[in-house]
Image (cartoon, grey):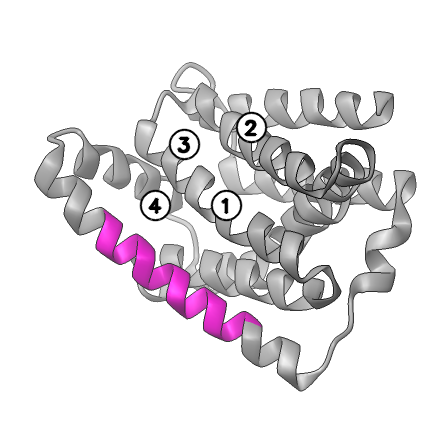
Amino acid sequence: MRRLAVTLVLAAVLWTVMFSPATAPRVNFWLMMTCSAVVLSTLATWFNYGWWRQTKWNLPNLAAGVAVAAVLWGVFWTGDKVSAMLFDFARPQVDAIYGIKQSASPWLLSVLMVALIGPAEEIYWRGYVQRTLSARLGANAGYAVATLCYALVHAGSCNFMLVMAALVAGVVWGGLYRLFPERFSAIVVSHALWDAAVFVWFPI
């Protein structure tokens, strides 16, 4: 648990630097996100390589991952429309998130998110954090705490919509891992495809 705590503090610091209005303009977001994902997934594999045994790459898991990504995109599209009607601050905060990708190559972002960032985040957050917490606290408590941590590391952005987006996505991916840990590869695929879809292919 001590190692897990250290990595969670590291994740919180990295995500705050990337997203905080005070520090974000001073860093290259995509370079830092890529490096952060590599570092955290490497630590996750070093400290607990058990996630690898749960990763079965087959057609049913690939299809399930695509389906989950599509459904989650629909959830976010609907949520964006509803929140825009209810809150004046919602759309400007969403636009601020999309501002991150300005001047970046769509092809490069697609490759980074599909091949590296999305999978690395799942290896860390579900394959290590949730897996470790569930072993220590029980499956339900581990799911709840991991999901809360996943949302809270985005709090430094001071962007309510980003924190809520992380919470909703964490509930979905963490819930799938809670129910179907043997389909971890499907969760990895869904995260990778959803990242690229919502940021590059079909922006909301």
* Disc 3, SS: helix
Q: Gap between marks 2 and 1, in whole Å? A: 19 Å
Q: Which residue is mark 1?
A: 171
Q: Residues within 10 Å of mark 3 (few under 14, many from 20)?
A: some
> Residue 130's quadrant in the figure?
top right
> Residue 177's quadrant in the figure?
bottom right
Q: Gap between marks 4 and 3, in whole Å? A: 21 Å
Labels 3, 1: front one? 1
* Disc 4, SS: loop
- Region rendered in magenta: 65-79
Q: Is residue 2 above or below residue 71?
A: above
Q: Which mark identifies residue 15?
A: 2
The amino acid type found where label 1 is placed reads: Val
* Residue 93 seen in render: yes
Labels 4, 1: front one? 1
* Disc 2, SS: helix
In primary-sequence order, the first of circles 2 and 3 is 2
Q: Which residue is mark 4?
A: 102
| Label pair 4/1, CB-CB below 8 angstroms | no
Q: Is residue 71 above or below residue 25?
A: below
The amino acid type found where label 2 is placed reads: Trp
Residue at (50, 65) in percent of width and height: 193
Q: Nearer the viewer, residue 154 or 79?
A: 79
Q: Gap between marks 3 and 1, in whole Å? A: 12 Å
Q: Is residue 113 left or right of residue 143?
A: left
Q: Which residue is mark 3?
A: 163
Q: Nearer the viewer, residue 135 or 54?
A: 135
In primary-sequence order, the first of circles 2 and 4 is 2
Residue at (65, 28) in percent of width and height: 11
